[in-house]
Image (cartoon, rainbow, N blue to C red):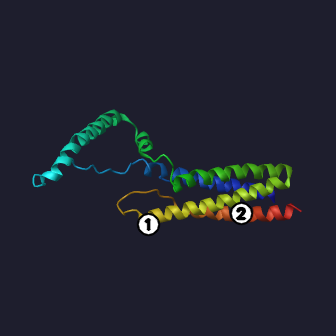
Amino acid sequence: MAIVVLVLWLFTVGAGFSLLVTSNLSRARLTPPAQAEEPATVSVAAPAAQAAPAAQAAPAAQAASAKRQSRAARDRFAPPSLVAARSAPVLPGLRSLLEFAHPAFAIIGLGFWLGYTFVHYRPLGWIAFGLVTATVCLGLSWFAASARAARRRPKDEPGPSFSTRLVTLHGGAAAVTFALAALTALVLGR
């Protein structure tokens, strides 16, 4: 039974890998959001009290604008992935963390289940079951976060897209893997 779970887990990993390869996840993140620049002009009808601070702020705004133009000239030949990486926040968002953690937990859990399949050492099976549980939770969280982001995104803005058939296949295989891993850990653990 442990071998059946191992083969099913490998099938689930393969479906997940093909899901990532066929998606446009990397291309959807390459376009950085457009930033609106504030004009640094003073209106003629402004009172003198407001014109003085604006006149003092004008050289600072011009310096910032010159700095942006210098950076744009330097980044003219930068690939889109480098531009996106430079404009990305220092700390990743929830979806980026889930995009990394879900496959990482799945692969580590697969390694523990492989060890359990070969040596039938009960703690390895329970660690693998704990990791598959965490993987399922992370996968469902990733799915919910992506669905919520898709609902909030404007219709004209492209976002990540996944094949519905592959998502269903991956989720179904993961559910069966989870159930059989629990059953195997319980039955063979005695």
With 95 as the anchor, is 180 left or right in this view? right
Q: Which residue is mark 1?
A: 151
- Residue 127 location, x and y as percent? 77, 55
Relative vertical location of residue 144 with respect to residue 118 in this rendering, above or below: below
User: Which callout, 2 or 1, points at the residue further toward the start of the chain?
Assistant: 1
Q: Is residue 91 above or below residue 157?
A: above
Density class for disc 1 (Cα within 10 Å; few <14, some 14-19, many ≥20) is: few
Q: Are marks 2 and 1 in contact (CB under 8 Å)?
A: no
State the SS at label 1. Answer: helix
In this rendering, the label closer to the viewer, 2 or 1: 1
Quarter of the image that includes the N terminus:
bottom right
Q: For this view, does 44 lie left or right of residue 18?
A: left
How far apart are labels 2 and 1 at the CA level?
A: 29 Å
> Secondary structure under badge 2?
helix
The residue at 44%/50% (across/down) is: 29
Measured from the top left, where is residue 170 in percent x and y?
61, 60
Where, quadrant-wise, is the C terminus in this rendering? bottom right
The spot of residue 188 in percent (x, y) is: 86, 61
Residue kind at label 1, given as amino acid type: Arg
Task: State the residue in front, 17 or 60.
Answer: 60
- Tell me what residue is drawn at x 49 percent, y 64 percent: 147
Which disc, if any, is residue 178?
A: 2
Residue 25 in view: yes
Q: In the orientation shown, which residue stands out farthest toward the right?
A: 190
Residue drawn at the location 76% of the way across and 61% of the way down:
181
The residue most toward the front is 49
Disc 2 residue type (three-letter): Phe
